[in-house]
Image: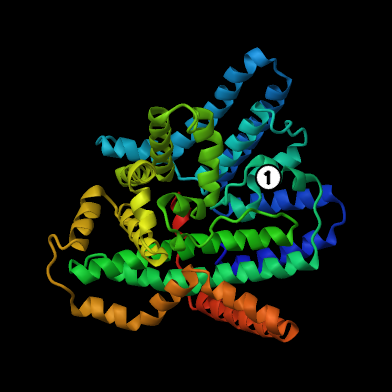
């Protein structure tokens, strides 16, 4: 079930909130949220739900065993438990693409919704217990809620166990939570339905275009579509979480205003970057063991980041692209970058990200390199054509809005208005966002919304 599904918006979500508010004890509320989360997941297929239940039982028993085991046996036990999760992830996500690539018949295993996200969520729990950052959860219900809480399960954000553990036992929902959660949810829905889906039409229309301008418009459309699609989902998940008393961390912080590659990845998919930093990069030694070890660790992290997204070689190249860029920035071009004016650095980093998304969007490396070549004038059939001009002309406002909303200008303007006019501004903003919500619902009724892009991961 998607956040843009009308059944979800008009029945599942409001009834869930009402049911939650009607219950008074934390245990009964946790039971309700777990049942709702399993129903939400079962909508995508019962086989996936069975797999989720197996993994929940697996990490519950493993966590209890890690808590009780002597230090000598904890390491092999941890790697056995973590290895089991990774084997399941490999079977369902990577085996069939690998078999197909080798010319063998795939097994046809169904792809469980959100398996990459909830597997890393489960690994976070095991790692936090193993390193004694947290104690093992003895309440199966609370652990099931952590792993399967429906707003974050299908597409993240990946919340580390120690971040959410306190709220599994005690949480409150204030009027501020309801208000800020509603605003966050509506913003996310608008990002998805108005901006991401609109730009997605441009991307689909221009995929076969071979002109210089056409390929650039294609790449820009995808860069903004991916950002508003994924950050929109994250905002909606955070907003829903607030309605139930959970404070899910932010996953995006205006990444297209970054002035370095490293800053970009501190602002884009923050949850995944933090996960690899805390559970891979730092345990490998981080930057503490000299230059060679640092380069090795960065390449390992970025290779794994690419593989996490999928078995396609395009993701591997995309991961290595960023790994090499971060190494080059750290040891070579950072001083040159700092000599540029801020606006120049923002444009440069955006273009670097835009080039990276070419690999992300392409179905294979041949297509990716062909598009890259055309972006730099190699193999183009002309400067532009009528198709490119049509889609650019009819979507000029959409691109302008994408540029504006990808920065912090709108947020700063809204904050300034609220500080200056206070209550009238609050009422005005409430009316404005209510109209935006109605616009989004009208678009959903018309059936113009598309599937979230990160559902594929």
Look at the image and name its color scheme: rainbow
Q: Position of residue 67 (x, y in %)?
A: 72, 24
Q: Residue at x 62, y 83 (%)?
A: 432
Position of 10 compared to 263: left or right? right
Q: Residue at x 59, y 41 (%)?
A: 121
Q: Nearer the viewer, residue 87 or 157?
A: 157
Q: Assign a secondary structure to mark 1.
A: helix
The answer to which quarter of the image holds residue 421 is bottom right
**Crowdedness of circle 1 by 10 Å Cα count: few (<14), some, many (20+)?**
few
Q: Position of residue 256 (x, y in %)?
A: 44, 62
Q: Residue at x 59, y 44 (%)?
A: 49
Q: Tell me the quadrant of the picture where the N terminus can be found.
A: bottom right
Q: Is residue 424 above or below residue 343?
A: below
Report whether residue 1 is seen.
no
Position of 333 compared to 71: left or right? left
Q: Position of residue 452 (x, y in %)?
A: 47, 60
Q: Nearer the viewer, residue 119 or 54?
A: 119
Provide the residue designation for mark 1. 163
Report whether residue 257 is seen.
yes
Position of 329 compared to 68: left or right? left
């Amino acid at each position: 079930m998607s956040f843009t599904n009308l059944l979800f918006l008009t029945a599942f979500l409001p009834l869930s909130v009402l049911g939650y508010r009607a219950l008074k004890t934390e245990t009964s509320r946790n039971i309700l949220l777990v049942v709702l989360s399993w129903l939400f997941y079962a909508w995508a297929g019962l086989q996936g739900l069975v797999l989720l239940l197996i993994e929940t039982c697996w990490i519950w028993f493993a966590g209890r065993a890690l808590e009780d085991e002597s230090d000598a046996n904890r390491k092999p036990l941890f790697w056995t438990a973590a290895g089991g999760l990774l084997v399941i992830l490999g079977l369902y996500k990577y085996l069939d693409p690998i078999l197909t690539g080798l010319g063998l018949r795939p097994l046809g295993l169904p792809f469980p919704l959100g398996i990459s996200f909830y597997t890393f969520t489960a690994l976070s729990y095991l790692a936090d217990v193993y390193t004694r950052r947290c104690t093992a959860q003895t309440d199966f219900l609370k652990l099931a809620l952590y792993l399967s809480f429906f707003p974050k399960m299908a597409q993240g954000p990946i919340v580390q166990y120690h971040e959410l553990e306190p709220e599994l036992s005690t949480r409150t929902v204030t009027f501020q939570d309801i208000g800020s959660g509603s605003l966050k949810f509506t913003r996310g829905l608008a990002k998805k339905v108005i901006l991401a889906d609109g730009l997605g039409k441009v991307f689909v229309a221009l995929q076969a275009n071979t002109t210089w301008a056409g390929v650039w418009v294609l790449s820009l459309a995808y860069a903004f579509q991916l950002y508003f699609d994924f950050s929109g989902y994250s905002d909606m998940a955070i907003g829903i979480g607030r309605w139930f008393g959970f404070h899910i961390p932010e996953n995006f912080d205006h990444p297209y205003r970054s002035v370095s590659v490293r800053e970009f990845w501190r602002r884009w998919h923050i949850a995944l970057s933090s996960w690899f930093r805390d559970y891979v990069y730092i345990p490998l030694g981080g930057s503490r063991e000299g230059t060679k070890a640092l380069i090795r660790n960065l390449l390992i992290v970025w290779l794994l980041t690419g593989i996490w997204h999928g078995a396609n070689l395009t993701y591997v190249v995309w991961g290595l692209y960023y790994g090499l860029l971060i190494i080059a920035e750290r040891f070579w071009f950072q001083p040159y970058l700092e000599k540029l004016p801020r606006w120049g650095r923002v444009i440069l980093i955006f273009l670097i990200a835009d080039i990276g998304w070419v690999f992300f969007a392409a179905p294979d490396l041949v297509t990716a390199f062909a598009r890259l070549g055309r972006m730099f004038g190699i193999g183009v059939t002309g400067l532009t054509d009528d198709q490119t001009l049509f889609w650019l002309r009819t979507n000029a406002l959409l691109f302008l809005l994408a540029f504006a909303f990808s920065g912090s200008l709108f947020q700063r303007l809204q904050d300034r208005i609220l500080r200056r006019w206070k209550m009238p501004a609050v009422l005005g903003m409430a009316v404005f966002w209510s109209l935006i919500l109605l616009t989004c619902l009208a678009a959903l009724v018309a059936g113009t919304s598309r599937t979230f892009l990160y559902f594929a991961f």
